Amino acid sequence: MITMSSEKTKVVGIDLGTTFSAIAHINEDTNKAEIITSPEQDRITPSVVLIENENDIIVGEIAKHNAVAEPNKVVEFVKRQMGKPKEDKKDGQGNVVAKGWCFEHGGKKYSAQEISAFVLKKLKNDAEARMGTTITDAVITCPAYFGDPERAATKEAGIIAGFNVLAVIDEPVAAALSYGLDKLEKDQNVFVFDLGGGTFDVVILEIKQGKIREVVVNGDHLLGGKDWDDEIIRYVAKIFKEKYGSDPLDDLSSYQDLQLRAIKAKEELSKREKAKIMCVHAGNTLMAELTREKFEEITKSLVNRCKVLCEIVLSDANMSWQNIGTILLVGGSTRMPMIRNMITEISGKTPTDELNPDECVALGAAWHAAILSIPGGNIPGEIVKRLAGVEVQKVASHNLGIIALDGEGNERNFLMIPRFTPLPFEKKDIFKTLTDNQGSVLLRIMEGGIMGEDDTCDPLDCTMIAKGSIRDIPPSPKGSSIEVAYKYNDMGILEVHGVHLPSKKEVVIKVEHTGGLTDQEIKTASANIEKATITS
């Protein structure tokens, strides 16, 4: 029996991954970040959930391997669904404007946040059992190119799991912190190539005087190791169908079994030149051979997608490879030789071998949690000294603008905060009323779009994230000044202040994204997870 200490609490860092997750802390005896292992001594936990019923949840290896026998109870790769509502969102004409997602089992619908919360709760329970203390405060990581809804959903998952989420930080930033606080003393540009199980990020970080700043962020959260698995699955299934006339992908159990074998073959091909893959379906068994050369051939288009994104990021940063001091490879999928070879070929540089791609994000998140906990925290003096002066600065990942009429009377989205702008950031601009005695002014806050040379774009290429009106404006002439101020802080909260200058009538719009759940839904999910038994 383990007794929880009521006096001492720990802060942790969590890598909530598509395929695997990990939790870490700062060891106060060694002053180092360390992975907190599970009771089974596992350092990483599969992000796979098996739902027997709403009170009996299995997370991890057993869930992953039972997917073969019970595919309708198992949910994987849920990270790709973060930020989506449970149901499709429709406009007034019934058109779907936002595709929903949920996992249905036993007559209940589970959101992506709830499924992710099961994984986080398992990590929390395991860490508390291992450390013998209550754990509440956590920093959770997400892909750098996640938008605000996905980030908010990640935070909601943490809250449902019982965490006080100190911050949701980008995985590449966490990797840089893990790379070494001592190395941050050297001013340089760091290129982070983060290819995980289901998401892909490329980020250029500027390290200057202990400050980490995201210069350029780009990514594809629908590209990851799973796509390499799928190519192997399709390759073997095609051979099977040609030989036996039936398709193993038509049967869920056969498909899941082949998926597990494809993952194992992918891992083998990182160490060997060929791998055997068995496929069993409809009473027939095939033993297929896949060489590394053939594997690289059938996944060439995926590698090219990675390569193109690297080139786009360098171009957006106005840099060449000569401007890059260090290349960090993050995520288990970077173990594939084809990835390392591609990076070495296009950059002319050798990526560092100093990071464990599976663990570095969780370790860096633990360092960030320690940084945030210094004021009034329970952090030993040696660690405080080591972290002194280290600062992480975010950038806006999307353009932010406002709708107004251009000189020809057309609605345009006028840029207020460009993407890649370091945060926090403020900007003011003056707009004009359209008519005499205009009684109200509508402010529509837009996100996204590709700006033209005049710093405007078509509103149809953007997403409206908020709106508000200045009301009860007293009579005033056409062309009266409207001052609009955007304040975007480093926690991802945008505040828009609009003022009709002649009358001082104003409106304040606070844009704080949610991940799709209401406060009541979060409370209900939190209560439900406390009643559930979560095992491995």
Image (tube, rainbow, N blue to C red):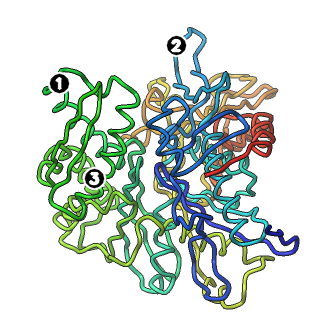
* Residue 502 visible somewhere in the drawing: no
Estimate the x, y position of residue 288 in percent, counting from the top left.
17, 42
- Which of the two discs, 1 and 2, labels the residue nearer the N terminus? 2
CA separation in Å, label 1 and label 2: 43 Å
* Residue 281 visible somewhere in the drawing: yes
Estimate the x, y position of residue 124 in percent, counting from the top left.
69, 59
Estimate the x, y position of residue 343 in percent, counting from the top left.
23, 64
The circle on residue 244 is 1
Q: Identify the amino acid type marked 2.
A: Asn
Q: Is residue 177 above or below residue 96?
A: below
- Which of the two discs, 2 and 3, labels the residue nearer the N terminus? 2
Q: Mark 1 Cα within 10 Å, few/some/many (few <14, many 20+)?
A: few
Q: Identify the amino acid type marked 3.
A: Lys
Q: Is residue 249 left or right of residue 420?
A: left
- Which of the two discs, 3 and 1, labels the residue nearer the N terminus? 1
Q: Which residue is mark 3?
A: 266
Q: Nearer the viewer, mark 1 or mark 2?
A: 1
Say whether marks 3 and 1 touch (CB < 8 Å): no
Q: Is residue 271 left or right of residue 252?
A: left
**Secondary element at tag 2:** loop
Q: Quadrant of residue 244?
A: top left
Residue, far right: 6
CA separation in Å, label 2 and label 3: 41 Å
Q: Mark 3 Cα within 10 Å, few/some/many (few <14, many 20+)?
A: many
The circle on residue 95 is 2
